[in-house]
Amino acid sequence: MAEHTRILAIETSCDETAAAVIDDGRFIRSNIISSQIDLHQQYGGVFPEMASRAHVEQIVPVIRAAMTEAGATWGGLTAIAVTKGPGLPGSLVVGVNAAKGLCLGTGLPLIGVNHLEGHIYSHWLEPSINNWQLASVAAATDRQLQSTTGLFPIMVLIVSGGHTELVLMTGHGAYELVGHTVDDAAGEAFDKVARMLQLGYPGGPEISRVARGGDGARFVFSRPRVHGTRGARTDAYDGQFDFSFSGAKTAALNVINQNGGTTADGKLSVRVPVADVAASFERCVVSWLVEATQRAVRQFKANAVLVGGGVSANRVLREAMTEAFPALPVSFPPVALCTDNAAMIGAAAHFAYIRGLRDDLGMDVVPDLKI
Ligand code: KG4
Ligand code: ZN
């Protein structure tokens, strides 16, 4: 029998203060995001102490707005969910303490959620299911645990500012990490190359914007060799599904320097072919992401591909990934749900709740939480 839930979810792992009310792990009743982009733009990246302070200022109004917009009452909630990791310690703790305080005051159960699991469950939110156009998936959410079994195993690529991971999902809440980046995350590499090209922050959307007018075949950054890398958590697969982006980043810097680099006053030389570097970098990163996913899908005989995290908003990646799997459902969340939000935390929490998972008020943040 389907179990109805209404969950207030809170997310403060990085630089967005977010709260959402989600019904049945699927319906978004409110989804409030207070972004700190303006605050961090001047540093070209997230400044942890300032992020933490901004969360403290924003958390109460954001939660209040999420409750009001949803027309939710404390008595009408099933549970309160919060991201417990991975993320910045000083940021995570603001959301976790707010959630604990609310649980203490209301008597509601607490559910700590892995942020990466949130990115995966963004695919179960209603607009994502519409994108997916798979009746079986919608039905799965209604009948909750049993009916997606036909769809598993699912290969999930999480590509964000902090993570680049290939995760084999064998059931709800059942994951195996099969590949990850051995250096920078894909989004982080986009952000760094954007900074070299003196584009804005966050860099991913900026690279994507200027790349439209560029020649993506002009510079070919050689494929990194990660095969056989030691020390990785995914040693079981000998690095076959691992990624590396720092080489491409350095190669981009070399191209910039060979074309005038920066002038004495710190400005980028007018000779730097910004659009071509951006387009070539985007094209290389996308091809590596797609090819590793293809190898993993083949190896684990996955029935579907889910791509989540901030970089999954990238248009070139969406097109290339969809083309690479003509016979499989390939799902991307709507662009607004690709980057950090609390709706996805509420979706993940629903599936944890119906599996009986609860956390106690002694729960702590886990900044390096793994999947
Ligand atoms: O998932 P997310 O919001 O935060 C983390 O959990 O890290 O991802 C943010 C990352 C940033 O690095 C940003 O540059 C990247 O996602 N990003 C993109 C695009 N939109 C956001 N990267 C490439 N293309 C985009 N369109
Ligand atoms: Zn994220």
Image: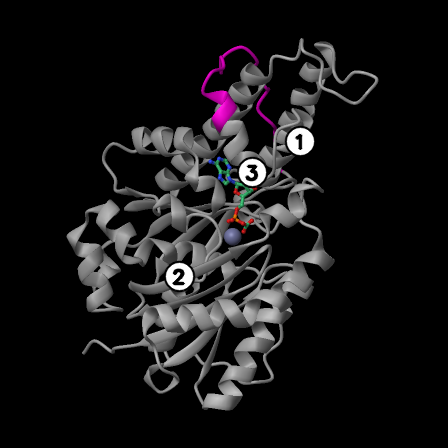
In the image, farthest residue toward the right: 264
Q: Please, what is the three-letter code of the amino acid marked with disc 3?
A: Ala
Q: Per the image, is 225 magenta?
A: yes
Tag 2–tag 1 contact (CB < 8 Å): no
Residue that badge 1 annotates: 195
User: Vertical placement of 68 versus 289: above or below?
Assistant: below
Q: Residue type at mark 2?
A: Asn
Left or right relative to 201: residue 308:
left
Q: Quadrant of the N terminus?
A: bottom left
Q: Position of residue 248 (x, y in %)?
A: 62, 26
Bin the neighbour count of mark 2 within 10 Å (Cα to Cα): few under 14, some 14-19, many 20 and up: many
**Start-end of magenta stretch:** 209-228
The answer to whether the beta carbon of the residue marked 3 is less than 8 Å from any atom of ligand 1 is yes
| Residue 292 in sight in this render | yes
**Which residue is tagged 2?**
31
- Note whether 47 is above or below 215 in the view shown: below
